């Protein structure tokens, strides 16, 4: 499981011109799921992201977590995170999980953030989405559960 985490002042996702998810201060999380991922990866990654201390404290130091700043999350499925661009000019997506595996894990990831008491918004799995954000910092991190 791979996540690109962007600290944002706001973010939204739209499908067919309609905003379906919108947050204020928090994280935009682009989530990619591969064949080997399990619920253990979901729980590890969600907890890792929740506890990241990348929000500024009163001294301007990145020292506060999402919960401490009462941040929100917008989670968007992103199979292209597992695009392999090593050969040719067209990415290969064979490492991205098929929907029958990816959808339940994506939904479990959403449920896990909701269980933390964090306002959680999402995109629509498999849809053509338009994502808008104001990256704060900019702060952008990439975390993979296989690296745990």
Image (tube, rainbow, N blue to C red):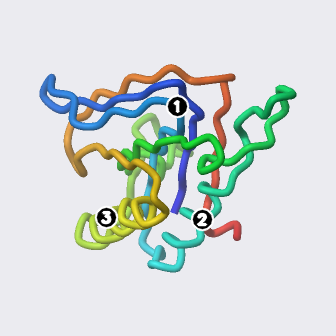
- Confirm or deny contact between disc 1 and disc 3 (CB under 8 A): no
Among numbered discs 2 and 3, the one appearing first in the sequence = 2
- Confirm or deny contact between disc 2 and disc 3 (CB under 8 A): no
Q: Determine the CA span between mark 1 and mark 3.
A: 22 Å
Q: Which residue is mark 1?
A: 25
Quarter of the image with the C terminus in it? bottom right
Rate crowding at label 3 as few (under 14), some (14 to 19) or many (20 or more) other CA atoms within 10 Å: some
Q: Determine the CA span between mark 2 and mark 3.
A: 15 Å
Residues 119 and 20: in front is 119
| Residue drawn 48% across the image and 38% down it | 28
Q: Quadrant of residue 35?
A: bottom left
Question: Residue 47 in the image: x percent, y percent?
Answer: 60, 65
Question: Residue 80 in the image: x percent, y percent?
Answer: 41, 45
Question: Residue 115 in the image: x percent, y percent?
Answer: 42, 66
| Residue drawn 36% across the image and 69% down it | 108
| Residue drawn 21% across the image and 36% down it | 20
Q: Determine the CA span between mark 1 and mark 2.
A: 19 Å
Rate crowding at label 1 as few (under 14), some (14 to 19) or many (20 or more) other CA atoms within 10 Å: many
Q: Which residue is mark 3?
A: 107
Residue depth check, mark 2 versus mark 3: number of the one nearer the observer: 2
Question: Residue 141 in the image: x percent, y percent?
Answer: 66, 42
| Residue drawn 20% across the image and 42% down it | 127
Q: Which residue is mark 2?
A: 47
């Amino acid at each position: 499981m791979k996540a690109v985490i962007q600290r944002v002042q706001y973010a939204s996702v739209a499908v067919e011109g309609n905003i379906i998810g919108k947050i204020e201060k928090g994280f935009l999380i682009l989530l990619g799921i591969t064949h080997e991922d399990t619920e253990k990866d979901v729980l590890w990654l969600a907890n890792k992201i929740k506890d990241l201390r990348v929000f500024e404290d009163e001294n301007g130091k990145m020292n506060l977590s999402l919960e401490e700043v009462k941040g929100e999350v917008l989670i968007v499925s992103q199979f292209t995170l597992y695009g392999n661009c090593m050969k040719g000019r067209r990415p290969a997506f064979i490492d991205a999980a098929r929907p029958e595996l990816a959808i339940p894990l994506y939904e479990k990831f959403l449920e896990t953030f909701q269980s933390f008491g964090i306002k959680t918004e999402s995109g629509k799995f498999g849809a053509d989405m338009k994502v808008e954000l104001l990256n704060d910092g900019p702060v952008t991190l990439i975390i993979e559960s296989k690296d745990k």
